[in-house]
């Protein structure tokens, strides 16, 4: 009779250990999701900080492009002030469009292309755009990993016992899929 | 800037990655079975003074593998004449790698350049925290930003999939197999008969004869099979690193373009040799023998790698 009790006790201990293991791994995964989310903001802030430097550097060379430069500064300020995910997403999109315009114009100024300062700033901005894109990609990858884990058996049992909800993917809204049509003049 | 990724490509590299990891696991298992089987056969046939030597050789192999595991990255870098760089030395290269580390949630590795006109790159390091990537000046100057990112994504994938750790383990197994076979065959030839005579059980002379023959066959063939298995694993991991690169960049054309450029260049990389060739992105030893027999190559054919990338 004691043997049966011992076996049941051992099985219970094993199950508890397994639940603890799964719980901890879910916590780790969820924290990776949250970390990845805040990484996106880090990259966005980098862009906000870099843009005034770029505009300063090119201003004197591009005296005929004041309109474009103004547009970039305004878009940047709007993006900083934007409230809520949807508004921020839209403002980010406008800013990307304005920056693309600016880079296209730089091609017409051989003096600018020879300027080391401007070229390294351009590389920094290109890299920052990529980093924003990659950090969003990473966030979505982490969300996918986490959601898959809590949906699959047997971890979904543990997830249900505690409050592990599905995380949301980072998505751009329908209207934002339209690339803004900006004219170059 | 931000790239548009077609939905259909998402399934392919995930499927490739998991299929590849499964196959690698099977190959490693086959390997361990091979070594275990060899050890069993030899143990059955030969007991006696030789065990002492085997033990010593085994210990040497393990010590060597530990040394290679912990200091191997510094050894490889010293042999290649690589110089470490910081962000200010090459901002574009640094940014490209930093972007990939963001995409993969990885720490930034130590970055080195090798002064050589032949185009190639390699990665080493037992885990992402101790990661090292290197690129030749020849390759650095030939690639566009996207192609450079593809190559670096491939190298980072070797690190994040723990390929270096795996290949160290395999290297030890191959070494052990060769050593065990070697010791046994030499002992057999030069007087291990004393040990075997002691092993003779009464009334089972015929059975023991067959065992001896099997053991000899195993001892001769096992090192060859071990090497072939090692090369097969190496090729699989190259395909895996390619798929891993696409997982990071979501842009197969970058790496495909780089591979096309590298394979088109016929120049031999001077600092590479047989010991380090498996670390490079494309086989740097362009001798006739390597090209002739794909079974003996550490890398899959470049055309096939490009074809798989274009299908993703």
Image (spheres, grey):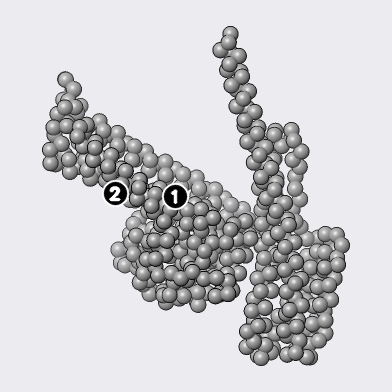
> Disc 2 or 1, which lies upstream in sequence?
1
Residue B282: which quarter of the image?
bottom left
Q: Which residue is mark 2?
A: B224
Give above or below for A32 relative to B286. Answer: above
* Left or right of A129 on screen, residue B87: left
Q: Which mark is residue A46?
A: none
Disc 2 to disc 1, C-alpha distance = 19 Å
- The quadrant the N terminus of chain B occupies is bottom right
Query: Is residue B309 at all visible to an observer of this figure?
Result: no
Percent of width and height locating residue B41: 27, 34
Q: Closer to the camera, B2 or A7?
A: A7
Q: Chain of mark 2?
A: B
Mark 1 Cα within 10 Å, few/some/many (few <14, many 20+)?
A: some
From this view, report whether residue B254 is shown above or below residue A54: above
Residue beneath the point at 74% across and 40% down: A164
Q: Nearer the viewer, residue B213 or A27?
A: A27
Q: x%, y% of residue B275?
A: 34, 60
What element does badge 2 sit on?
helix
Q: Residue at the spot x=47%, y=57% of the render?
A: B125
């Amino acid at each position: 009779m004691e043997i049966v009790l011992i076996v049941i006790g051992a099985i219970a201990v094993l199950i508890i250990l397994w639940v603890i293991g799964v719980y901890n791994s879910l916590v780790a995964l969820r924290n990776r999701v949250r970390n990845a989310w805040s990484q996106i903001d880090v990259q966005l802030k980098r862009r906000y900080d870099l843009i005034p430097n770029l505009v300063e550097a090119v201003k004197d060379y591009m005296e005929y492009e004041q309109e474009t430069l103004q547009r970039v500064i305004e878009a940047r300020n709007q993006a900083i002030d934007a409230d809520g995910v949807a508004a921020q997403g839209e403002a980010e999109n406008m800013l990307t469009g304005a920056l693309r315009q600016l880079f296209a114009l730089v091609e017409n100024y051989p003096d600018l292309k020879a300027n080391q300062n401007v070229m390294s700033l351009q590389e920094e901005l290109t890299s920052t755009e990529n980093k924003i894109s990659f950090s969003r990609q990473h966030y979505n990858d982490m969300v996918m990993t986490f959601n898959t884990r809590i949906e699959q058996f047997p971890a979904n049992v543990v997830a249900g016992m505690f409050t592990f909800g599905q995380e949301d993917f980072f998505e751009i809204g329908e209207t934002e899929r339209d690339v803004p049509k900006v004219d170059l003049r | 800037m931000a790239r548009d990724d077609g939905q259909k490509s998402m399934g392919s590299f995930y499927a490739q990655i998991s299929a590849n990891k499964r196959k690698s696991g099977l190959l490693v298992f086959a390997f361990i079975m091979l070594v275990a089987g060899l050890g069993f056969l030899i143990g059955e046939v030969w007991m006696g003074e030789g065990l002492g030597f085997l033990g010593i050789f085994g210990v040497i192999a393990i010590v060597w593998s530990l040394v290679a595991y912990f200091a191997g990255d510094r050894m490889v870098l010293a042999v290649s004449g690589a110089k470490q760089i910081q962000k200010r030395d090459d901002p574009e290269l640094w940014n490209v790698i930093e972007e990939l580390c963001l995409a993969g949630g990885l720490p930034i590795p130590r970055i080195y350049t090798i002064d050589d006109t032949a185009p190639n790159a390699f990665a080493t390091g037992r885990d992402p925290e101790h990661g090292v990537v290197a690129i030749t000046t020849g390759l650095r100057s030939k690639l566009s930003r996207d192609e450079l990112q593809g190559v670096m994504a491939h190298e980072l994938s070797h690190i994040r999939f723990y390929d270096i750790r795996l290949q160290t383990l395999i290297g030890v197994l191959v070494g052990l197999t060769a050593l065990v076979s070697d010791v046994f065959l030499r002992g057999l030839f030069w007087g291990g008969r004393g040990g075997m005579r002691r092993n003779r059980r009464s009334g089972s002379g015929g059975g023991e004869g067959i065992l001896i023959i099997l053991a000899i066959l195993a001892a001769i063939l096992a090192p060859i099979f071990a090497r072939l298995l090692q090369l097969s694993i190496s090729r699989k991991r190259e395909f895996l690193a390619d798929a891993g690169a696409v997982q990071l960049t979501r842009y197969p054309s970058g790496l495909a373009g780089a591979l096309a450029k590298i394979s088109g260049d016929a120049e031999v990389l001077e600092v590479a040799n047989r010991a380090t060739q498996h670390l490079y992105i494309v086989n740097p030893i362009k001798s006739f023998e390597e090209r002739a027999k794909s079974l003996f190559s550490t890398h899959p054919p470049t055309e096939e790698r490009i074809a798989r990338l274009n299908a993703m």
